[in-house]
Structure formats: C-alpha cells, structure tokens
Image (cartoon, helix red, strand yellow):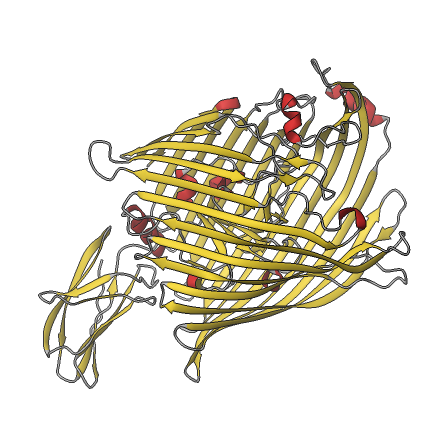
Amino acid sequence: MLFCRLSLAQTSAPSIRGTVVTSDKQPVPGISIRIEGLSAGVISDDKGGFVFKKLQPGTYVLQLSAVGIQPLQQTVTVAAGSTASADFTIQETSAQLETVLVNAGRKNRYTAKSSDYAARMPLKNLENPQVYTTVTAEFIKDQIITDYRDAFRNVPGVNSLESVSNGRTSAFIRGFRTGNYMRNGLIASQLTATEVANLEKIEVLKGPSGTLFGSSYISYGGVVNRITKKPFETASAELSYTGGSFGLSRLTADINTPLNEQKTALLRVNAARHAAGSFQENGYQTNYFFAPSFQYKVNEKLTVAVDMELYSNHGTNLGISFTPNAAAYPNMKGYQDLNYIYKRTFSSDDITSTLKGYTFFGRADYKLNDQWSVNAVYTFAGVNAKDQLQFTPTLLRGDSVSRTVQRYAHSYNNQNAQMNLNGDIVVGGIRNRILVGADVVQSVTNPTYIKRFIYDSISINGIAPYISRDKIDQRLAQTNYTSAFKSNAYNFGIYASDVVNITEELMVMLSVRWDKVDNKGTTSFLNNLTTGTFAKSTFSPKAGIVYQVIKDKVSLFGNYLNGFTYSSATDKSGKLFQPERANQWEGGVKADLLNGKLSTTLSYYNIKVTDKLRTNPDDINFQIQDGTQVSKGAELEVNASPVSGLNIIAGYAHNTSRFTKTNANIQGKTPARAPGDMANGFVSYQLQHGALKGLRVSAGVNYQSKSWCDDVNTFTIPDFVVFNSVVSYDFGQCRLYFRLDNISNEKYWGPWGNAQPPRNLSAGISVKF
C-alpha cells in the first residue's frame, strides 16, 4: 500500500522533497527514487529523506524501486517558486525489509550496520569509536549452529571453546575471560547452556566497557550481548529437525502470529528439544527450551514488550578436563601428551545434574517527540540447580588417576532494572546524540551446600570401574559439608553519554559513569560468620573520536575505555583496597564500501590493568595493591559479499599479554588461556539461477596458536587448525542441510583441557508454513 501526502511550501526554486518509511514508520535509507523521463535520480539518506532540486514548474511522476521491494510511483505537481512534498510508505515493516534486502542480495548477510545496544543509543558502526562484531541470524542459520560456542568461530580474537560442567560457555577476549551474562543489554545469569534457537544475533564488544555496563558481569576483554528474537507482523511458522553424530537429535519450532487485525498485538514462540551423547566413553545431555515473546503497540508513542525463557537441562558433566600434574609427570609438557586418553573420562552416566533456568524480561518504549524517547527495562533471571553432581579426574604418579565427586546444591538469581533517556538534538548548529540512564542490579546466591570426596584411585589403563549413584549417595551421607553459604550484593549506576558532531565528518563521544556496590557479604552456615561485607563507589570515564575520511564509507577512530573491579580484601591496616582498573587506548580504521558489500575493521589496542592485588613481599599474610598487567595487540576483520550469493568472512588477531608486576612466580609470564595468534575464515556461495537455484556450499577454517594452561607457564594447550563445511538446499518452503565438522579429525583441546569433538556430521530439514 502507498500513502501519499502532497503539500506546497514557498521556496526560492522549484523542488520536490520527501521521505521513504516502512509500514511501522521507520526510515528507509538507500532506496532509489527517479523522475520518469529524466536520467537523474536520488538515493534516500539515513533518515529516509530525499530531494530533487532546481526543477522546472510542472507535473512529474516519481518512481521508487529496489530489488525485492514492490515498485511504487506517484504524481506530483510543483509550481514556480514552491516545494512539493511526496512521502512513500512501503508495505514491509523494518524487520521484514531487513530480510527482503538480505535475500535479494542487496545487503551483506553477515554484517549489521548499526546497533542500539553497543552504545545504548542508535549508532552506526562507522560512527561508533568502539570495535564490535555482530554474529547475525543469517550466519547462525547458514552455519547450522546448534552449539552456542560455534557462533563465535568467526569473531576475530575470541576463543569460546570453554564449556564447564553444567554447559555454561565463556569467551576469552583480548586475553581476558568474559562470561556470557548479557541478554538484550541487561544482566541475565546463565549457569546452563545457552540455547541458540531464540537468538536473533550476538554482539561482541571489544575492550573494557565498565562505563555503560558496570562491573558485575563483564570483563576487561569485552562484553558478549545475546539479542533474542522479537515478534513481527506476519504470521509464519518454521519447524526444523537435526540429527547427527554422537546421538544428536534436535527439534526446534519458531511460530509467529499477530493477535488482532490491527497487528498491534504480536506473539512469537520459540521452542527446542536437544538431546546428544558424547564422543567420549560416557556422557549425555537432554535439554528442553521454551521462549514466548509478546509485543503490544499501545499507540504511536508507546510500545510494551514482555518475554521469558524457560530452560531445563539434565545429563552428565560437559567438558570434563584433566588437571595437569607436573610433579607426577615431569616429562609431560602439554595436553598433546594426553592424546592417548583423548576419549576417556573415567566417569559414568550416573553422575548427573538437573538444572532449571529462567529469564523474565519486560520493556516499555515511549517516544516523547521527534527528538526524545525513553525506555524502561527489567529482567529477573536465575537458575535452580539443587541437584548437581560434578566429577573431576586428577592424574597421579604411577599411571593412575584419582576420581573426585562433588555434590553442589545451588540456586541463585539476579534482578536488573534500567532506564534510559535518549535525545537527538541540535544545539548551536551542532548535533548532539544524548544518553542519560541509570541501572540497578541485585545478585542473590541462595543457600548453597557443597560436599566433596575422593571416590577412588584407579589405573589410567584399562576399563574404569563403574561409579554408581547408590554408592555416591552412601558416601555423601557420610561426608560433612565442604562449604555452605549464601550471599547478596547490590550494584547501582548512573551514566551519561553524548556523541557530538563537530562537523558532519568529525564526531566526539564523551561518557561517564558513577558506580556503587553494596555487598552484603557471604554468610557461612558452617561457622555462622559473614565475611566480605563492604560498600564502595567509583567513577568510570569513556571517550572516543571518529573522523569519516569518506562520509559513510571510511572512518578513522580512536577510543579510551575503562573498566573496574571491586574487591572485599583489605590491607595490613584493615583498609579496603581501591577498585582494580583497566584502561584501554585503541585506534584504527573502519570501512563500509561497495554499497555495503565490503566491510572491514583494523585496530590496534593496549589495555593496562593497574591496582592489581599481589602478595606483600614483606609479609606474605597480607596483600598490597601495586600489581599491573598489560594486554596489547591488533585485530583485522573483513566481511565481504562481492557478488550476489557469495559471502566471505576473514579475521586475524594477535595478542601479547603479560603480568608486568606481580608475584615472583608469575612475574613476566603470560596469563593462562591467552593465545598469541588466532585466525578464521569462512566462504559461502548460494546459486542464484538455474535448476539448482538455492544450493549453498560453505567452508570454514579456524586456527589458534598454543597457549598456557596455567599462569606459571609450565603446561601448554597445543595449537590447532580445524576445518568445517556446510551444504544446504533451499527449495520452496523447505530446506535440507548437511554439516561436517573437524574434517581433518584434529585432536585439539579447549582452554581448560577439555577434549574437543573429532570429525562429526549432522543433517536435517527445515519446513516453513
């Protein structure tokens, strides 16, 4: 449907001015508008606006066209000395338009040009002085990703091979471990595995980001923010089934529907059932996931949305790792020396855990006027993990291994409330994009009880005696609690940011945060003592500069980023230590060329951590606060779609991390799990014509240099090169796909010494309705 609005206004020369918007009133840039019979044409700008200047008085036919969009036209009459106005509204919503342009080959499937989360304001990548990478829904789909860790394969400098016993994944970014705790820009605890069925995209922000995100659940390396699927105005449904090696059996559903004729009430439901065994001698997981999302447009100014995620996980430990023992095996230099037990766990399928995860989320967006808007968001998330059994094997002398079992009864939750005021105003002829906000986080660990005992010691050779649940329960009944505690902490923050356009090409970002922690401490039920109680506050600044050498195509940028970490420790006199700080300086270039078909980022960064605690050399019973650590390096990311159907991703990252002032045993050493070099590549091509139109063939490769397993640098995690491929075929409403991972059958290890899967395959079908 096309809505036209015609009006006349006095001006010095005849002209036609107008806008192009989607059906949900969002501006559409990059659309061609021409005048019938004339060779000249214009392209709509970032706000969807266009203008034809210096026309002769008369009647003109305006034609709007773009690949994948229904052509539109309207007739406009312009008189001498006046301006005619012609506004176009295309049929699609902004979300639908994104899909149309991607499918039509006009947009690079694997790039996102802007983000509302990275700076907590709408900002294009070329305008943002901070480096970030987006893993798009199209990339997740094309790679047939069923494991959250695989989504990071093509994010330069990110190692996400870690998977701890309950399935939770962390990423190592720029030499620092980063938890995956952010969901839609808010903190959401994630003790269990992350389900990809409800992911729209993942944003990985590089560098310390305490100014906007605080310190509770992020690291100095960056922030990982997973963004969930939202409902849209068209009814649709998609069912998928995937089966594969090691007992993989996965069923997903994605159902969307408007709930009224006006399409102001929208509902989307994602669900999944995932079951898999293990390539090792034992292990399995069975997971269920349910995620409804509801959105209601109250009026043109107010929209509210609520959603939730419910997750049930049952199975054995994931990612069992072996702790290196240099004393027992002095000739063992790295995990490559453990390849002979690559598929061993020495555990059993009776050592299981059941975890229930939940997230409830609400958001309200209110548009005050054309310049100002406000949003309020709230999330309540947690995990009920009162029935966990964890297993740890430890290598001993004489080719033997001890087997430790731990019972972990655990339950925790957090609440996060946030309010943001955003403005886009012109003051004194200078554009200012303003953010003022506040947030509060409460983190609660409910009574947690831990029991641990050594089950037995066995030979590393031969079949491991079975560990039965009956024997575990008997031993647990005879074992005292190793630990029993609860905790509660609050974080408060007020922040402000302003992106100032000094000129059209030169932008400066200035941001600051005041942050306060009120830690109520940890109470032990073994001695009834509460420790770690403290209250502390600090400021966190941020600054950036962007100069667009070529407007909307090439940007030079620099940033100063800050992060901080509180500590409950005190010095010899009993005085609370100041927060530890990380300061990053970074500079580089971003480019978006060939009408968006080539995007690249090149940067160099230097992160220095100061005020780290270390042992007091004059009194080893206390600590002093003068330690330092440095992480520096360079990163390159290239994302290209040179011809329709062809997508190329390539990345390289080099990092040098050192403890520069610390305890003598690690002075000058490299932090554990910080590889020096990482590289990635991915090429995908889909046939656009012919009998096999819809056939897509993809191949990828990942390289990681060796790293240390410990801060003392005595045991290595070997380097590796891993290849993978995907073949899919889209026809009608169906899609067939096949994926082969670790093609060369490489034996490689994760950051905690957890063996990674050998060659494996998966295949499936997806049907849309």
The image quadrant of residue 534 is bottom right
Q: Residue at x 36, y 49 (%)?
A: 640
Query: Is 12 left or right of 258, judged from the image as shown?
Result: left
Residue at left offset 82%, top offset 40%: 483
For residue 191, above or below residue 39: above
Quadrant position of the N terminus in the picture: bottom left
Q: Nearer the viewer, residue 407 or 657?
A: 657
- Quadrant of the rendering where the C terminus is positioned: top left
Compared across the picture, whether 399 is left or right of 554 comes to right
- Left or right? Give the position of 532 relative to 509: right
Q: Is residue 451 above or below residue 37?
A: above
Residue 125 seen in the current view: no
- Give residue 195's position: percent from left, percent from top: 53, 39
In front of the other: 36 or 254 = 36
Q: Nearer the viewer, residue 63 or 302?
A: 63
Q: Residue furthest top?
A: 462
Residue nearest the viewer, comparing 731 with 767: 731
Q: Position of residue 428 (x, y in %)?
A: 44, 85
Residue 711 spot, x, y in % from top left: 72, 44
